[in-house]
Amino acid sequence: MSDKQQVCSFMVDRYLFGIASHRVQEVMRYKPMTHVPLSPPQVRGLINLRGQIVTAIDLRRCLDFGDHERGWDPMNVVVYSDDSLVSLLVDEVRDVLEVSSSQFEKPPGTLTGVAHKLILGAYKLDDGLLLMLDTDAVINLGQDKLIEPGGQLHNETG
């Protein structure tokens, strides 16, 4: 049994992130999005992927890196989520890397904030760190109920 894993890597801000390649359906250039009213700020919109509606989540917003300058078109990393697909918007797509469990370390206990919730750990590479993203945590981030039981809109600001 091999302890090797293939990871789809990409850049968000100046950091190298990765997702297990078996979770990735495809990578594609920017696609026009339709804004969703009342959605959390990290949900940039919906895209039409060959007839299937896919939610686009902005990783810059999830990680509190702020928005890119106007005119920037993100790349889409389309990942499997339970019974649907979700697009993760990233700055730049990199290579598929093969990593070993001996290179992996869990995040330190001193890591706090959003990074603590979204980072599974890091692989030590020759030229830096590959931060492993918890895809499920990203997808669930900010999915506070906007509609309360009984159909009433929930106002998140009070």
Image: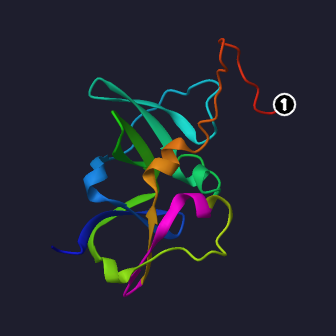
Which residue lies most toward the front here?
A: 1
In the image, what residue occupies the spot 27% across and 58% down?
Answer: 21
Residue 42 vs residue 92: left or right? right
The image quadrant of residue 132 is: bottom left
Q: Quadrant of the N terminus?
A: bottom left
In the image, what residue occupies the spot 61% across and 30% down?
Answer: 39
In the image, what residue occupies the spot 41% across and 59% down?
Answer: 92
Is residue 111 positioned above or below 63 on the image?
Answer: below
Residue type at mark 1: give it: Gly
Residue 76 shows in the view: yes
Residue 5 vs residue 139: left or right? left
Camera-side residue of 131 and 137? 137
Asked if residue 28 is among those painted magenta in the image, a careful observer would answer no
In the image, what residue occupies the spot 39% across and 37% down?
Answer: 31
- Which secondary structure lies at badge 1? loop
**Where is mark 1, residue-wise?**
158
Which residue lies most toward the top here?
A: 150
The residue carrying pointer 1 sits among few (fewer than 14), some (14 to 19) or many (20 or more) residues within 10 Å by Cα, namely: few
Which residue lies most toward the left here?
A: 1
Can you give x and y, in whole percent of width and height, for residue 5 in the image?
25, 69
Is residue 89 positioned above or below 105 on the image?
Answer: above
Camera-side residue of 136 and 25? 136
Asked if residue 124 is among those painted magenta in the image, a careful observer would answer yes
Q: Quadrant of the C terminus?
A: top right
Residue 73 shows in the view: no
Is residue 104 positioned above or below 27 on the image?
Answer: below
Residue 118 vs residue 155: left or right? left
Can you give x and y, in whole percent of width and height, for residue 103 in the image?
36, 82
The image quadrant of residue 129 is: bottom left
Can you give x and y, in whole percent of width and height, for residue 147 in the image?
64, 21
Which residue lies most toward the bottom here?
A: 126
Q: In the rendered structure, which segment of residues is drawn in magenta?
A: 115-127
